[in-house]
Amino acid sequence: MSATNILTDGEAGVISSAPRYPTLRRFARHRLAVIGVVIIVLLIIACAVGPSLVPYGQFQLDMRHRFQAPLAGPHLLGSDELGRDQLARLLMAGRISLAIGLAAMLISVGIGSCIGLVSGFYGGAIGAVLMRFVDAILCFPSIFLLLTLAALIHPSVVTITLIVALTAWMEVARIVYGQIRALREQDFVAAAIASGSTSRRIMFREMLPNAMGPIIVAATLIVARAILLESYVSYLGYGIQPPVPSWGNMLEKAQQYLTTAPWLAILPGLMITLTVASFNFVGDGLRDALDPRSDLR
């Protein structure tokens, strides 16, 4: 009989009681993060299928029910100055905001990870030049850089996504750079170099997977930031242009009706707040879940 098969009852009990999914268990302990996941999932489902269930289209005019208050007529969440259904427009705007947030996150994480990976692995002059470039861009406030780019480019969903992504990758680059510099000194990297592995294989197959924890956390927070930045730009008139709805341009249009129809501003503002807060809560939960030291707290 092998040594691995000789277990006392006590030892078997200890082994069987060990948590199989410690990361998931730590995440589940973060109640706000769990609530954030539920809200995000419900929001995605609502924005994906909700517009097809609402009896009014996002551009459909109902002049007989202009400025209808929520729950006071045929429009569930009220209507705007042209009688357009607020629920339909909020859900369609959610599609745009979530699409921009997720797409901008993927692009910015890809750019930032590649720059941080290369600069952290090679170091020296290559790393110094790349990171000084990152530092130079970080010197400019993101909102001003975003507005400058948006003013020079014709606004659309694609261009706004690219502009937001180009102003959000620098933090990812710095995070990945720090992680790769720490991993560069680990034994498994030295073993890979000694075995003759190529630099590309070492970076993408050995080091990058070990740096995924901070990248995932940063990616979650970038989604929230991208949605907020898109709302800023659209509110200031440089983003998604009416009549296509976005939460930002709905807020901008509603500001002249704050005293007569406050729900026109409250509802999109609430959607922005709820979405951004949910992604931030999930990011906080992931940061705790991916840190094994949180079990010792």
Image (spheres, grey):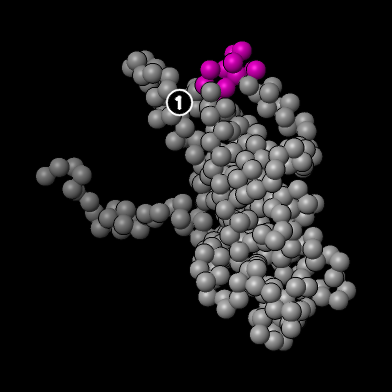
The residue nearer to you, when weighing 265 against 280, is 265
The residue nearer to you, when weighing 267 against 151, is 151
Residue 171 in the figure: left or right of residue 184: right
Q: Which quadrant of the structure image shows residue 138?
A: top right
The answer to whether 194 is drawn above or below residue 173 in the figure is above
Disc 1 marks which residue? 203
Whole-percent x and y of residue 130?
63, 21
Label 1 environment density (alpha carbons within 10 Å; few <14, some 14–19, many ≥20): many
Q: What is the magenta segment's predominant secondary structure?
A: helix
Q: What residue type is labelled 1?
A: Met
Residue that appears at 50% across and 60% down: 28
Residue that appears at 80% across and 51% down: 236
Whole-percent x and y of residue 202?
41, 24
The answer to whether 71 is drawn above or below residue 8 in the figure is below
Q: Which quadrant of the structure image shows residue 204?
A: top left
Residue 198 in the figure: left or right of residue 82: left
Whole-percent x and y of residue 289?
52, 51
Task: Tally the numbered discs.
Answer: 1
Is 125 colored magenta in this rendering? yes
Residue 48 in the figure: left or right of residue 171: left
Disc 1 is placed on an element classified as: helix
Q: Which quadrant of the structure image shows residue 141?
A: top right
**Residue that protrudes farthest toward the left in the picture:** 1
Residue that appears at 57% across and 28% down: 116
Is 124 colored magenta in this rendering? yes
The residue nearer to you, when weighing 71 against 126, is 71
Question: Which residues, given as a range, are shown in magenta?
Answer: 119-129
The answer to whether 191 is drawn above or below residue 105 in the figure is above
The answer to whether 53 is drawn above or below residue 176 in the figure is below
Q: In which quarter of the image is the N terminus?
A: top left
Residue that appears at 63% across and 56% down: 97
Residue 252 in the figure: left or right of residue 291: right
